[in-house]
Image (spheres, rainbow, N blue to C red):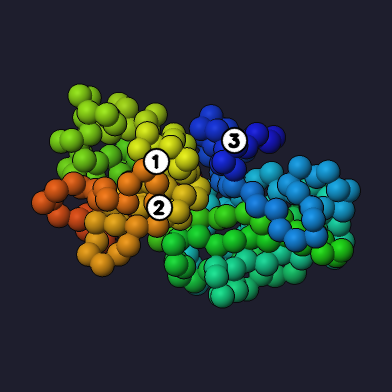
Amino acid sequence: MQSQATKDGSFPKTGIRLFNFLMVTGIFSLTFGLVSCGGGGDVSGSSSNTPTITYMTAVVSGVPGIIAAPTAQPLTIYGTNFVSGTTVTVTNNSTSYPVTSPVIASSSVITTNVTITSVPNDSYVTVTVQSPGGNSVSGILGVAHAYKTLANDIQPIFDSNCVSCHGASGNLNMESASSAANLINEFSSGCPQHLRVAAGDPRRASNVLVDVIKTKIAGLPAALSCNNFTARQMPQGVAPALSAADIDAIVDWIALGAN
């Protein structure tokens, strides 16, 4: 099963929710944006020897995505044009994470194991699949401290810090009945080329929500710059910045699919 990517490389809300809730199979899926790298290939598979990635799953105690842990965790990558000799690397900037020799189960499935002992900078790793000929494709995989859900962990943070301004009468309703529909994979009205919450991709440069709550922290510059949006810090005004624990919870929630 595949989900068609939107123009910004993310997946539609319905596709992400479908992957994330394939509970009848016992596997939770995390979809992620695609970036073509090297060899002149692209993720559409127009070149017969260029691999593509449609999605991948990493099962850790029944949780979608990757939770940092001291032991190796299984990773399954689904796509096309996987052949003998294809390699998998997992990195974050200059850090490489141990990956076992990938098993090419078929031209559309790779299985391997990866060890990510702690949450890396910006809570993500880049997974790159490279063919023997040098063509490659990469995707972002969120890494979290723990699994968080909107209903149990994130909405209480919104209720305490956000809905006094972002309620039913505001320009962005973050009350419990509306927060998911208004945030997840929805473009920001103030920063229209960026998503408010990019499910599965927790980077500040991908999420307006993450950027504005982190920008509130003294001395931390904004990652996004559009329509004077960098002047906005949330919560606004004299309200204190969110606690480190609350920010980590929101980032964890996004990293594991924003369920």
Above or below for 141 versus 95: above
Q: Earlier in the sequence, mark 1 or mark 3?
A: 3
Secondary element under disc 2, as helix, strand or loop, is: loop
Query: Tag 1: Cα neighbours inside 10 Å, few (<14), some, or many (≥20)?
Result: some
137 or 18, nearer to the observer? 137
- Residue at the left extreme, as displayed: 238
Residue at (32%, 51%) from the top-left corner? 230
Q: Is residue 69 left or right of residue 219?
A: right
Give 82 or 130, whichever is nearer the viewer.
130
Please name the amino acid that badge 2 sits on: Leu
Image quadrant occupied by the C terminus: top left
Disc 3 marks which amino acid?
Thr
In the rendered image, the residue lying farthest to the front is 227
Q: CA distance from mark 1 to mark 3?
A: 17 Å
Query: Which residue matches tag 2?
Result: 224
Q: In the figure, residue 136 lies in which quadrant?
A: bottom right
**26, 74: nearer the viewer:** 74
- The foreground one among 95 and 207 is 207
Count of marks overlaid on the render: 3
Q: Residues within 10 Å of mark 2 (few under 14, many from 20)?
A: some
Q: Quadrant of residue 4?
A: top right
Q: Residue furthest top?
A: 169
Pointer 1: what residue? 191
Query: Callout 3 environment at 10 Å: few (<14), some (14 to 19), or many (20+)?
Result: few
Q: Are marks 2 and 1 in contact (CB under 8 Å)?
A: yes
